[in-house]
Amino acid sequence: MKPNAIGARLPSRTTFLLGFAALLLGIALAIAWVLGVSLFFPEGALARAIARRDDLIRAHIDYLMMAQFLFLFALLFRQYAIRPPLWVIAASCFGAFNNPLSFALRALQPKVDPATLPPVEPHFPLIAGVSFTLTTAGFLAAAVLAVRAAWRAGNAPSAETSVSASFEQAE
């Protein structure tokens, strides 16, 4: 960690990624509690607020999955001493938060009978397109960084190999 202007140490990018993954895991667990409570109290206010239970389940699973990816990337970055570019962290975190959020928000919107709506051309919402694109770019870049570092580490002579070779040469 580097000191800031006041002298305090700033969290590393990897630490930020771990913290953000923990936040996503917390959100997923909160959604699990909401789903559980609404299941056991189907006539309660909480259950009535959920218009589309299947979308809330999708949000729960998606937050779990996104947290898992961020945890894995953070641990790989730490394992291989990778300092990922800020754009990789920002893109990954933005997408990992917003992709499941769209399911969660949709779960709270009441279903509308399509017969009562005027016909419209189907479209892909802009925020979804931006979020999907950033997630894809961030996750792919993180994976490439990790694979490249693992490849280099696998091709570098290990401490065990070099020690064994030096003992063999000494005999």
Image (cartoon, rainbow, N blue to C red):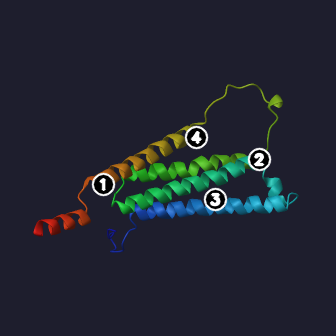
Find out whether the residues at labels 4 and 2 contact each other: C-beta distance under 8 Å.
Answer: no
Query: Which numbered disc, 2 or 3, marks the residue that appears first in the sequence?
Result: 3
Three-letter code for the amino acid on which mark 2 is drawn? Arg
Residue 154, numbered label? 1
How far is the residue under mark 4 from the one under mark 1?
38 Å
Which one is closest to the eye, mark 4 or mark 2?
2
What residue would you read off at disc 3?
28
Please provide percent x and percent y for residue 22. Answer: 54, 64
Q: In this view of the protein, which residue sits in the foreground, 80 or 12?
A: 80
Local secondary structure at mark 4: helix
3 left or right of 168 in image: right
Q: Secondary structure at mark 3?
A: helix
Quarter of the image for the C terminus: give it: bottom left
Residue of label 4:
128
Lower position in the chain sequence, tag 1 or tag 3? 3
Judge from the rendering whether residue 27 lies leftward or rightward of residue 18; answer left or right.
right
Sort mark 3 into few (<14), some (14-19) or many (20+) by Cα contacts within 10 Å: many
Look at label 3 and name its amino acid: Ala
CA gap between label 1 and label 3 equals 36 Å
Quadrant location of the N terminus in the rendered image: bottom left
C-alpha distance separating marks 2 and 1: 48 Å
* Amino acid type at image mark 1: Gly
Label 3 vs label 4, nearer the camera: 3
Residue receiving disc 2: 52
Task: Indicate which disc, 3 or 4, sits on the residue closer to the N terminus.
Answer: 3
